[in-house]
Image (cartoon, helix red, strand yellow):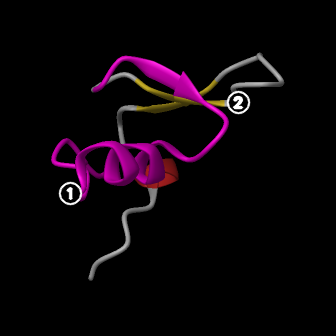
Amino acid sequence: MIRINCKQCVFYFVTWQANQPHGCKAYGFKSKQIPSLVVKGSTGQACQSFQAKH
């Protein structure tokens, strides 16, 4: 299994909210966990929107 590093994705962003520090623009949510873990837990599949930063 390939592990997705959200911090290397164009859709990842850091929020200013202490209780939800991680965000994903592709899926449109903020979370306490890294977005790829939330997507995997919710859908059972790895993130399909990952795009590496250049």
50, above or below 5, in the image: above
Residue 54 in sight = no
Q: Residue furthest right?
A: 18
Q: CA distance from mark 1 to mark 2?
A: 23 Å
Give the mark toward the camera: 1 or 2. 1
Can I make out residue 39 in this image? yes
**Residue 2 placement (x, y as % from top left):** 29, 78
Residue kind at label 2, given as amino acid type = Pro
Q: Which residue is mark 2?
A: 21
Q: Is residue 52 left or right of residue 33?
A: left
Q: Residue at x 61, y 44 (%)?
A: 33
Identify the amino acid type marked 1. Gln
Numbered disc 2: secondary structure: loop
* Residue depicted at x 19% and y 41%: 49
x, y percentage for residue 3?
A: 37, 72
For the point 24% across and 56% down, which residue is it? 44
- Disc number for residue 27: none
Which image quadrant: the N terminus?
bottom left
Q: Which residues are magenta?
A: 27-53
Q: Is residue 22 left or right of residue 6?
A: right
> In this rendering, is residue 50 above or below 30?
below
Secondary element under disc 1, as helix, strand or loop, is loop
Residue at 37% x, 63% y: name it.
Answer: 4
Q: Is residue 41 magenta?
A: yes
Task: Give the x, y percent position of residue 12.
Answer: 46, 35
Q: Is residue 33 left or right of residue 29?
A: right
Q: Is residue 35 magenta?
A: yes
Depth check, front residue: 7 or 45: 45
Depicted 41 relative to depicted 11: above or below: below
Q: Label 1 belongs to which residue?
A: 45
How dense is the environment of label 2, judged by Cα within 10 Å: few (below 14), some, or many (20 and up)? some
